[in-house]
Structure formats: structure tokens, C-alpha cells
Image (cartoon, rainbow, N blue to C red):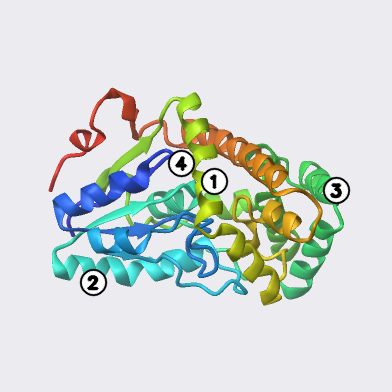
Amino acid sequence: MRRAVLLTGPTASGKSELAMRIAERDNGVVINADALQVYDCWRVLSARPSETDTVRAPHALYGHVSANIRYSVGNWLDDLAPLLGTLEAAGQRPIIIGGTALYLTALTSGLADIPPIEPEVRRLSQAMIDGGRLAAMIADLERLDPRTHARIDLANPMRVQRAWEVLRSTGRSLTQWQDETPPPMLPRTGCACFVVHPAVPAQHAAIEARFRKMVTLGALDEARDFLASGVSETMPSARALGAEDLMRHLRGECSLEDAIARAVTVTRQFSKRQRQWFRGRMADWDWIDPADGDPLKRIPPE
């Protein structure tokens, strides 16, 4: 297989445009590695590729999952494996792009073979999340699984919930399972790996400009359709950045301008956590600041 390009960076960093330019130059296919762009309900709000984008370059694993499905990193790897085989046979270069660092880490470092979570444990954990008992889950991890407690992002409810479920369902810590991880699908050494990291002020400005543009392009209609669909707001698909705020506006709980302002703030906070993850887990990747010149020149053709 031709050497894959792995491209990540915080939200609104310009990585999607760069991925398309690589695909145009190298006869490549842009492959999604973003946990929200897989869902069919958020074309605008998740910044999925537009029809114009898909004309410029072929794209894969975007918008192929129903909003009422719990899609995991394991599901993504299962979908990715046959696609990589198809691209290898066709001589096309994979350009795997997304801000969900967990997907890329699982791809290059392997994914622990953890048994399915017992349904009763899943129901209990969701009831705790819905009931505002995240702090109790964190306290359980600190007491019963201090290694995982020290490793995961405690500000991310999904990560806390996952670690708590694994411990409760399997009797073993998430860290123990991860320490027995099988070989990765694409080892880091066999890929060209890049982090796009614009200056924070520039990225913050891009976040606000992009979200306001999303509202004009139909993000509010997507939120309205999601509410009408009856899909639970506790599902992973409901966690698109800005979705909660737009739905609050549609329920009459805040003005549209207040919803936009809060969504921009939440997105900036999320991008800060992304940057922290990248610095901690992807320090050995090649880092690109778009202000330093044409980023395409930093990525060798193949």
C-alpha cells in the first residue's frame, strides 16, 4: 500500500482543505477520522465535506452512520480495514484526517480487545450521566482504578463513562486492557503523520467565523430535524459541537445570538483540550503552522 498520510489538528485549523490538496496531487482518497462526521444528521454542523469538496477529491466514511447508533472507534477500524485494502488494489493513497485523536491513536498504536459492555452496566452508567453524577463516576475511578483515573481526560464525560463501564463490566481496569493491546493496523513508523497547529488567536477567529457561517448554511435546520427525529440527546450523535446550544434556542430557552456565543465558547474549550492531547500523545508527529508557508510543501508526494 502507498504510504498513508495521517492528518490531524484542532477544529477549524484548515486540515480539511489541506487533505483535499494532498488527494488531488497524489491520486488519494480523503478518509474521515472524526467521531461526529460519521453521522448522517450533521453535514453542516460537523463540517462534513460539501458536494463541491467531493467533486474535487473522493471521500470515504463520512455520513454513513445513522444518528441512533452508538458508533465506536472499534466500529471505525472495522470499516476502515476493507477500505484500505480497496485503495491498495487501486493504487490510491489514503489521506486519513480528523480531530478525533483517539481514532488515530488506535490506528497507529492498536486498540485493546475489550469485551462488550453488559447492557445493565451501560444503562446504569447512562443513568448516572443523565442524573449529573459524573463526579461520582470519577470518584469511583480514583478509588478503584487510580492508574486509569490518572491517564484519561477527566473533563471528557465520554472517556470517564467508558472507563467506568469497563471496570464495572469486566472487573479489570481500562489501563490493564490497554496494556495488552494487539498490533496496530497502520504502525506510526509506516505513515506520514502531521498535526496542523495554527496560532491560537487565528484558530479562535476561524471557529467563530465558521460557526456563524454554519448557521447561515443550515445548521439550525439540522438541529430542528434532530429534535424532530426523536433520537435521544444522550446518544453520541447529539454531541456535535453547538448542537446542544442550537437545540436550546429552538426550545425557546435562549436567543440565537446567545446560542451562537455559547457554542463558540464551547468549541474553543474543546480545541484547547485537543491541543493538549496532541502535545501529550503526538509530540513525535510533524507539526505544521499554516502561517509558515504552504503546508502542502511539507508533505512529500508519493
* Residue 228 located left or right of residue 43: right
Task: Give amino acid for label 2.
Answer: Thr
> In this figure, which residue is indicated by the disc labeled 4?
12
What separation in Å lies between label 4 and label 3 (alpha carbons)?
34 Å
Mark 1: few, some, or many residues within 10 Å (few <14, many ≥20)?
many
Task: Give amino acid for label 4.
Answer: Ala
Residue 211: which numbered mark, if any? 1
Quarter of the rendering containing residue 229: bottom right
Can residue 57 be seen in this snapshot? no
Task: Give amino acid for label 1.
Answer: Phe
> In this figure, which residue is indicated by the disc labeled 3?
136
Compared to 44, does 148 lie above or below?
Answer: above
Can residue 197 be seen in this snapshot? yes
**Number of marks present in the image shown:** 4
**Residue 160 % position (x, y):** 70, 50
Secondary structure type for disc 3:
helix
What separation in Å lies between label 4 and label 1 (alpha carbons)?
10 Å
Which residue is drawn at the image coordinates 29% and 44% (left, top)? 18
**Residue 24 % position (x, y):** 18, 53
